[in-house]
Image (tube, helix red, strand yellow):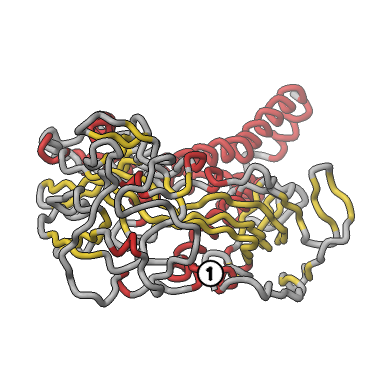
Amino acid sequence: MAIWDKPARAGGLGGSATQTFSANSVKCPNCGSNLIFDPIRGECICNNCGGVFDPDTLDKVGAFGFVNPERDYDGTIEISKEDAERVEIVCNSCGAQIVTDKNTASTFCAFCGSPALVSRRLTREFKPDYIIPFKFGKEKAISLFEEHCATVSHLPKSFKSKKILEKMTGLYVPTWIISTEVEVNVAGKGNKGRMVDEVYTESHANTLNNYTMLTFGKVKFRLNNVPFDGEIKIPNRLMAACEPFDYSDLIKFRPEYLQGYFAEKYDEQPLDMTDRIYKRLDRYAFSVCEKITFGYDTFVPDTNASYTSYNNQNIKYALLPCWFLNVEFDGKSYQYIVNGQTGKVAGDFPYAKGWETIERTGRRAKMNAISLNTGLRAGLYLLPALALVLVRFFRFGDTFQWMKFIYNSPGELLIVLITMGLLTYFLAEILPKILHSKAKKDMESLNQTSSHDIAEEQGAEAYFDTTFPVVAYETTQDFVSLEGGWRYGEEKKYDFTSAQPEAEEQSVNENATEFEKQGYGRRMMH
């Protein structure tokens, strides 16, 4: 059984009582003093004698020792000698737990700012398989945070102070990094012509040039290195906001990289987070399907009729570097994160007095403009029908006079008819498209994240495996859409009349883990 098939213990703690910790850090081979990992040099340094040592070649001196081979770390096996000698710092206020050595002290909690901390012996296996070392130190992290604050408009002047920023803490976050192949049996609506506008769709039936067609297809691609933190106390949105990480820096774990920093133990394994993991992967699958048109002007996938399967998975357990800061301001607590590798800053920022109301008023005005746009498009689409009604039920003067005008002024009549035709075409065909395009842009601007809001989760494009090209083809009837054009094929057909895929015999790999089985044949985003 793999590690991700074994649920973690509740709370991530064992049953041992609190004990006083006593252990050594990695020592300097020259003078025996404690070594600290310097992220700028990427080496361990001794502040006593000035010695500099490569973590990959440093001889075993202290209690940490060399890295162990990969194995299952599930919280149920006996704790290793190395981990038994580490210290666990627990916050009595919020319950957060971090792992360190006795020479890396903390006077406050990185998550809630509370000083109510207790130290005890580590009671659970900790050592990960991989790590991305910190690329910069605390001063640089504070500088990056201040630079980001300068880009946030209407931020209260009294929001940050040197005293608050000094509480920034370097922390390695336990993370499950998942790579998987994605296969989607997708169903949805393919739209042609004016049917791409939902306003037109609501009030008009299919025609030869404007129609909506129930469509089935198959989409295949691979996602590479999607991270999921395994620590309950860290908000998932906060960790997602500081992505992506550059996994070319991912190396085998060595304890020397922890010198001078804190590290979290995982509280949850992938099997504990099945719903959270697969829902995020489903969102990526949905976003990919939205970008595929299958030859229509637009294609809108239906999550209730689409199914995803995740195969050939690979899962790594790693520590990722992050700087955390908790700020108490105006009676509220704000949490911030700085990516310890890329320097990306994320978090929710407060407004200076009155500015949040002004911004909300502007958004409300834009929403009202979108509603007005929708109503205007509905009227324009009905314009030709209204014109025919007017001609049919109203008489414009004496019929004899009209006949006389037609006979005496055929040129003027032709000009009038052409002008009316062009005007009607513009109002009923061109102008609605312009308005529809503007409405889409307004909606996109409303969906854009404000500089005060936490950054959005990374899109699927950030995790595409470029060595595994996206494959998509339509399977609605008896043909498939390929890159080279259309051809009749032997792909699995669907019963189009009943709008349901034909039954397919699907077998789960008998060697699949329980976590992998949870990702097979899922109804999308459920």
* Vertical position of residue 268 compared to residue 440: above or below: below
Left or right of residue 217: residue 301? left
Mark 1 residue crowding within 10 angstroms, few (<14) / some (14–19) / many (20+): few
Front residue of 75/78: it is 78
Q: In the image, what residue type sits under mark 1?
A: Ala
User: Is residue 247 toward the left or the right of residue 381 in the image?
Assistant: left
- Taking depth in this image into account, of 61 and 214 the one nearest to the observer is 61
Q: Quadrant of the N terminus?
A: bottom right
Q: Position of residue 212 (x, y in %)?
A: 69, 56
Residue visible at 33% across and 60% down? 82
The answer to whether residue 393 of the structure is visible from this angle is no
- The residue tagged with tag 1: helix, strand or loop? loop
Nearer-the-camera pick, 139 or 327: 139
Image location of residue 164, percent across then percent down: 13, 41
The residue carrying mark 1 is 2
Say above or below: 228 vs 76.
above
The one nearer the camera, 309 or 293, is 309
In screen coordinates, is 324 left or right of 317?
left
The image quadrant of residue 162 is: top left
- Identified at 74% across, 73% down, the residue is 498
Q: Can you see residue 16?
A: yes
**Count of marks, rendered view:** 1
Q: Picture coordinates of residue 403 (x, y %)?
A: 75, 34
Picture coordinates of residue 273 (x, y %)? Answer: 44, 67
Which residue is painted at 46% across and 46% down in the image? 458
Q: Residue at x 62, y 34 (%)?
A: 426
Q: Is residue 432 left or right of residue 27?
A: right
